[in-house]
Amino acid sequence: MNFPRTIAIIVILIAAIIIASIFVFRPGLQQPEKIIVVGTTHNPKTLDPAMVYDIASAIVVQNIYDSLVGYKPGTAELAPKLAEKWEANENSTIWTFYIRKGVKFHDGTELTADIVKYSIERAQKLQGPPSFLLDVIDSIEIVDKYTIRFILKYPFTPFPSLAAFTIFAPVSPTAENLEEKPVGTGPFRLESWKKGEQLVLIANKDYWRDPPKTDKIIIKIYPDPITLRVALEKGEIDLAIGIQPQDVEVLLKNPNLKIVSVEGLVIEWLGMNLRREPFNNKLLRKAINYAIDYDYIINVLLRGTAARLYGPLPPAVFGYDQEVEKYGYRYNPDMAKQLLAEAGYPEGKGLRELELIISSSERAERKEVATVIQRNLKEIGIDVKIVDLEWPSFLERLFNHDFDMYMVDWFPDYVDPDDWIVPLFASYGLNLDGYNNTLVDELALKARQTNDPQLRIELYKQLQRVIVEDAPWAFLYVPKMYVFMQKNVEGFILYPAYYIDFYPVYKA
Amino acid sequence: MDRNIISYFFLRLIQSIFSILGAVIIIFILSRVLPGNPAIAILGPKATPENIERVMKEWGLDKNYLEQFSIYISRLVQGDLGNSYIMGISVNKLVIERLPASFELVVFAFIISLIIGIPLGIFIAKKHDSKLDLIFSSTSILGFSFPTMLLGILLLLFFGLGLHLPVGGRLDPRYTIKVYTGFMLIDTLLNGNIAAFIDAFLRIIPPALTLAIPLTCLMVRFTRNSVLEVMMQDFVKTAKMKRLPESIVMYRHILRNALVPIITIAGLYFAVLVTGDIIVETIFAWPGLGRLIWEAVTLRDYMVIQGAVLVVSIIYISVNAIVDILYFYIDPRIKG
C-alpha cells in the first residue's frame, strides 16, 4: 500500500479538474426558449388556493390561478378578471358575479359557475388558514351556467375586493393532489417544484387572454438576501424579489440594473397596551407620537424605501384622507416633553422601564427602527427595553396581551379601508391594543354596510381623525415595494396588493 | 468473524435502537414545548382564537399530547413520518428531497478535509517543534475558530464577484436535469451533460470549502498530536531500531495507531455536518436538511421538525455505531 502516492494523485487530479473547469470550460447555455429567471427570498409553502395565507406562496399561486376579481395595472383599484362584472342588492347582502365565458383550466375543463361554487365550498370544507375569509358567505346559488350569487350573512360592501383574494380562485374539479400539482386557469402551469429550491412555470398557450410573452419562468429561492444580491449583480437572475433596503442605493448605481417600485399597502406601527398603565393615559401616548424622529427612520435608516404613515390607513387605499398629513404627528421633542409632564410624568419621573417586543426575524430592519425609537424615547425621559422574539413566540405574547409596546406590520386580506379599521381599531376586531371607542365602532360598522362610495369616503375621513386624535399607536411608516431587474427585462408591473404578475414580463 | 465481534455488533444495534426511541420522545416533547403553534405562525397578526382553533382542529392538533403521540408512533412504525401541516405534503417526501443535497455537500467537504488534513498533520508531526510547526499550529487554531457566517460570505463574494464563478444553489436553474440519485454531481454525469456537471462542480466548491476549512484545521491538529503521541511510544522505537524503512514505520506502525482518535473525531464531525450546517445552507441557497429543519421550526410545523430531526438522529447514531465498528479493524488492541 502506498498511501502518500495515492493521495498525491487524488489531490493533483482534483486540482486539475478545478483549474480546468475554471479556465478551460466556460459552460455556454443554450437558450432556444424565452426564459426569465426570478430570484427571491420568499419560499412558497403550499400552492393550494384553499390553504395559501403567506406572501411567498401567493406570489406563485397568483400566476397559476386567476381570482374572480383582479386589479387595474399598477394600482389597488379593482378590475374584472374571471368575473366580467358584478353587482349587489341595495344593502350589499346579495352579490351576483358574471363569469367570463370560454375560460379553460390547464387540463381543458371549461370554467362554469358550478366550478366556482365547488371551489369555494371545497375551501370552506378544508378549513385552511385563510378559510375565515369565507365566513361572511351564508350560501352560494347558481343562477345559470355563467352566473353565480353569493348570499352574505350581513351587509358587506367590500365583498368584491375580498373576491380578489387567492381563496376565490377556481380550481379544476378533476384535479387531485392540488397541494403539489395545481390546476388553475392562470397564465402559467406548474412544471416542477423542488421545495425550498426552485419552481418552474410554463406558459399556458390556451390562456383566455393572449398567451404570456415568456415561455418559462424559473423561480429560484435564495434564503439569504446577500446571495440574492450577488446573483442579481452577476446576472444569474433576471429579476430579484427581496433585496434589502440597505442594498438599494448601491444597486441603483449599477448600470445593468433597474428598479420598479410602488407604494405598498403594508403599514408598520408601534402599538401600545391601553389596558395597562401608563398607556391608558392619552397624553403619554401623544407624547410618544411626538417623540419619534420619523424623518431619520425613513430617510437615513430605511434609505427612502418607505413613506410616512400619518394615520390608520396607507395612502394607496380607497378612503385615504390627505388631510391626515397636516394634522398627523410629526417629530417635536419639546412638545413631547411638555405632554409627558402634563401626563403626570415630568421628564419621565415615576415611569417604570417599558418593554417593547418585536420580531426582527420577520422583517430585518425592524430591530434598527426599534433602536432609534428607544433612543428617541430616552431623550424625553422614557426608558425602553427592546425584546427581540422569534415570530411565533412574538405572536403568542401579542395575542395574550402580554406586552407594553410592540412593533408589527399589517398586510390586508382585501384592499378596502374596512380591513384596516375593523380588525385593528374596532373593539369587535382583533383588538390588539385594547383600544375602545364606541364612535369608532359605530362608524366602522356603518362604513362596511353602506353602498354609497361618497358616504364611505366621509365616514373613513371621520374615522381617521378620531383615531389619530386618540393615538392608540405611534404611526410609523409604509414600506415601499420594489423589485430589481436586469435592464433588458420589460413589461413588469408591480401592484400595491403584493400581486407579482409574470404574465406581461418579457426579455427584450 | 469471531463470536466477540458478533456479540459486540448485536449489543451496539440494541443500544442504537434505544437511542432512536429516546430521540423520538425527546423531539416530540421539545417541538411542542416551543411557544406558539403552526396556526399562529401562518395566520400571523390575524390569528384570532377562533381562527386558531378551527385550523388546529383541522390539523388534529386539538387532541391531547398523548393521543397525538400515539397516532404519530403508530404511523412511524410503518415508516410514515406524517404530513406537513402547512404544506400538506408527506414528510417522507420532503426529507428524501433534501437529504441528498446535504449529504453530497458534506461528503465533498469531508473528502477535502481528509486528503488535505491528514497528510499535512503527518508532515507537521515529522517536523515537530520547528518554526513550520509553530506556524501551522497557530494557523490551524485560527482557521478552526473563524466564524462560519463570515467565512461563508467572504467565500461567496470571492468566488462570485472576485473570480466570476457561479455561486448559490446546486445548479444553474436553466439546466434541466433528470433526477436519478439526487446527487447533483452524479446526476449531471448520468444525464451526459458535461457543462451542467462543471456548473454543479463549481457551485459546490465554495460551500464545501466553508465547511472544510475549519474541519481541515481540526484534522491537522488532531493528526499532528495523535501521530506525535504514537511516535514516542516504545513499539515505534523498537520498529525503528529494527531498521525498518521509515515509510513502513510511519504508515504501518504509527499511522494505524494514530488513526483511532482521528476517526473518532471525524465520525462525530461528519454527523454534526449532516445535520446540515444551517448557516452554510442559507448563505449558499443550498436546499439541504438543515434549512428544512430551520423552516419547520419557524413555522412550528411539528411533523416536519419531528421527521427531519429523527432522520438526523438516525444518521448520527448510525455513524457513531459505524465508527465503533471501524475500531475493530484499525486498532489491534480492541480486536484482542
Image (cartoon, coloured by chain):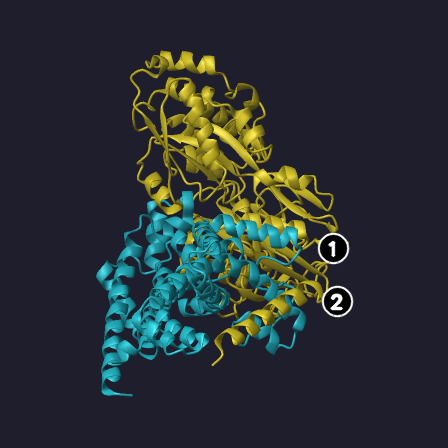
Chain colours: A yellow, B cyan
Q: Position of residue B11 (x, y in %)?
A: 22, 77
Q: Amino acid at mark 1?
A: Lys
Q: Position of residue B206 (x, y in %)?
A: 56, 58
Does residue B221 sit above or below A244 in this rendering? below
Q: Residue at x 45, y 27 (%)?
A: A373
User: Which disc, if any, is residue A507?
Assistant: 1
Can the viewer see residue A121? no
Along the line of sight, which residue is nearer the eye, A269 or A372?
A372
* Residue pointed to by mark 2: A32
Q: Position of residue B182 (x, y in %)?
A: 52, 72
Q: Earlier in the sequence, mark 1 or mark 2?
A: 2
Mark 2 Cα shell of 10 Å, populated few (<14), some (14-19), many (≥20): few
Along the line of sight, which residue is nearer the eye, B180 or B326?
B326
Judging from the image, mark 1 belongs to the subunit labelled A
CA separation in Å, label 1 and label 2:
13 Å
Q: Quadrant of the C terminus of chain B?
A: bottom left
Q: Residue at x 37, y 79 (%)?
A: B242
Pointer 1 and pointer 2 on the same chain = yes
Q: Is residue A16 left or right of residue B87?
A: right
